Amino acid sequence: SGHKKKCKKIARAGGAEAHYADKKAKEAAAEAVRQSMVPAGTTCFICRGESSTDGVVSLTCQCAGEIKFVHISCLAGRARADVSNSSDTNWRDVGDLADAWRQCKNCGNIHEGPIAIALSWEWWNWAATTQAESSVFRGVALNGVPNAYFENDEFDKAIQLFDATLSWQRRSDPSGKTELITLGRLSEAYLEVGRVDEGLRMIREFFPKWLTLCQTGMPSETLTYFSDHMLELRLFDEAIVLLREQQPMARQRLGRDNALTLALAVSLSFALVMRDGDIPLEDVVEAEALSKDALKRIRRLGDASDIFPHYIHKAEHNLRLCSELFKVSR
């Protein structure tokens, strides 16, 4: 019967998850070919046209000349070969594995757009057919798909796929680390599509848990991207409410000289003085005090964190704006 044939097909593909990933990889590859609009007869630089009849894509990285044209399946085959000896007991290997699927081997740049999406499905297909369900590699690969859609500004699709990722992470990663990473990205996607209340609720839920991980050695700088993203979206009023909660929490848990504590202080100062309309004098005073204190501490700490130069620039900008606002208020 048709049902039995379908079951056999799924079994041959390595199970339902692998069958689904393989199907989506083929669809995504076809879409990447369609958008590339490479002339018929163009040769893949890897197989020279011998291993695939699929269409060729034009890479969006820095490659030029004949190495710019390639089959998605050939790129995936190269990535599979690169990661065949990796071990999920080594977190450096996990990073290297991600680079094998996300990064061009020739120029070193990250793949983008439909090509990145197609390769992310190939990555998941590889993990579903070769890795145990509890493998870290499988979870990282599963997370790669919604991240590819997110980077391509397809936020609604990313939200749907992040939900699937969370389901796996809650079953297979008791540490909760990978779940928190996904919740962070999912909250950003909610903000992007205008589901601000959901995004803020999610940030409030995972922020204290992240701080706990930071106390055990997790780099705290990771947490700065939530506030930075809100400021980029000009959600200043929402950012002020959230940062007035988070900054004292970070200060208490991580210390006054912690990179995250200082970054959140500068971001709060920025939000206070960047709002539209009249800005209360007390908010200008608060913004100036926050930026002055953060700037003094960051300069004393020197190059203790890679994010400090960015926040020095932002704090100096805040102080210039505060000076202008004080003049207007007189």
Image (spheres, helix red, strand yellow):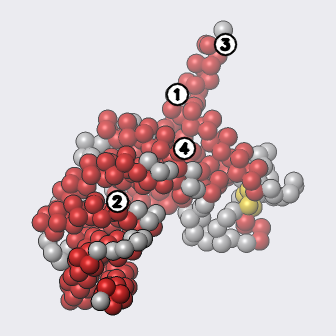
Q: Earlier in the sequence, mark 3 or mark 1?
A: 3
Which disc, if any, is residue 238? 2
Residue 107 falls in image quadrant: bottom right
Q: Is residue 132 above or below residue 55?
A: above
Mark 3 to mark 4 CA distance (whole Å): 30 Å
- In the displayed structure, does residue 143 sit left or right of residue 21? left
Q: Position of residue 174 (x, y in %)?
A: 25, 42
Q: Is residue 166 visible?
A: yes
Q: Position of residue 7 (x, y in %)?
A: 58, 18
Mark 2 Cα within 10 Å, few/some/many (few <14, many 20+)?
Answer: some
- Kindly report which numbered mark, 4 or 2, lies closer to the viewer in this rendering: 2
- Kind of residue indicated by mark 4: Lys
Mark sitting earlier along the chain (4/2): 4
Comparing labels 1 and 2, the label whose residue is closer to the camera? 2
Q: Which mark is residue 157?
A: 4
Q: Which mark is residue 16?
A: 1
Nearer to us in this view, 14 or 98: 98
Q: Secondary structure at mark 4?
A: helix
**Residue type of the residue flagged with mark 1:** Ala
